[in-house]
Image (tube, helix red, strand yellow):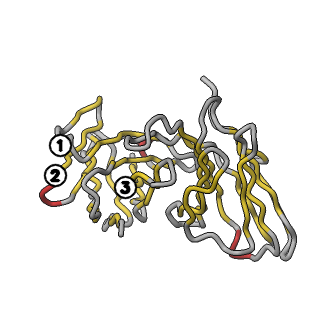
Amino acid sequence: AQKVTQAQTEISVVEKEDVTLDCVYETRDTTYYLFWYKQPPSGELVFLIRRNSFDEQNEISGRYSWNFQKSTSSFNFTITASQVVDSAVYFCALSFILTGGGNKLTFGTGTQLKVEL
Amino acid sequence: AAGVIQSPRHLIKEKRETATLKCYPIPRHDTVYWYQQGPGQDPQFLISFYEKMQSDKGSIPDRFSAQQFSDYHSELNMSSLELGDSALYFCASSSNIAATSYNEQFFGPGTRLTVL
């Protein structure tokens, strides 16, 4: 069974602070993919990053960085120098390949990030 | 670039009514997925289609049915609507290039269904 846990329900920070969103996953598959999505108040799901199970190289993209550790089944996401526009719900998700074709995403429960002035 | 189109964007229905949500995938995408996101919840997988055949089924109520048509668009039909069906319904599409590789899902903007 696939499971994604985001233990942080809500995080509040002051603008310019760094913030890390935690994600822990469970899967028996050896090949899988991990994602972070952002959902602003407008409701759309914005894709941020994808990592496959064979690529543990951490990545930095602007103010965003990701830390994938297979040994602890964690895929954490850090925003550096947070801004008010970063306020949103962030979902971590896990995907595996369907035998019938395509992939299936299992989402965590999300972390509501509030960045205040 | 063309994106996934969902219609309508907003829908208001009464209890026990029927609703039909439509999804138009990105051109040349052959796989469609439906997700349901209740208020304050994470998106939950409902059903998927690959080449017009159902490829997987999640926690979709028996009152719901879906299909993918010859032009690859998909429709989610919801009957005997209940208050608890109020949610944001996302459609996503992907191109199943290779069965053993990951094929990125592109999400539509969602249809917000309100059942009164």
In the rendered image, residue A74, in percent from the top left (x then y), is placed at 22, 57
Choose the circle earlier in sequence order: 2 or 1. Answer: 1
Query: What residue is shown with label 3?
Result: A94
Task: Give the side of residue A95 with respect to residue B106, left or right.
Answer: left
Query: What residue is shown with label 1?
Result: A56
Which mark, by number, is residue A69? 2
User: Up-down: is B91 above or below B37?
Assistant: above
Which amino acid type is marked by label 1? Glu
Could one spot residue A42 in this view of the protein?
no
Q: CA distance from mark 3 to mark 2?
A: 14 Å
Q: CA distance from mark 3 to mark 1?
A: 15 Å
| Chain letter for mark 1 | A
- Using the image as rendered, state which of residue A23 and residue A62 is in the foreground: A23
Task: Name the residue rendered at 60%, 23% in the picture.
Answer: B1
Which amino acid type is marked by label 2? Gln
Residue B114 picture quarter = bottom right
| Chain letter for mark 3 | A
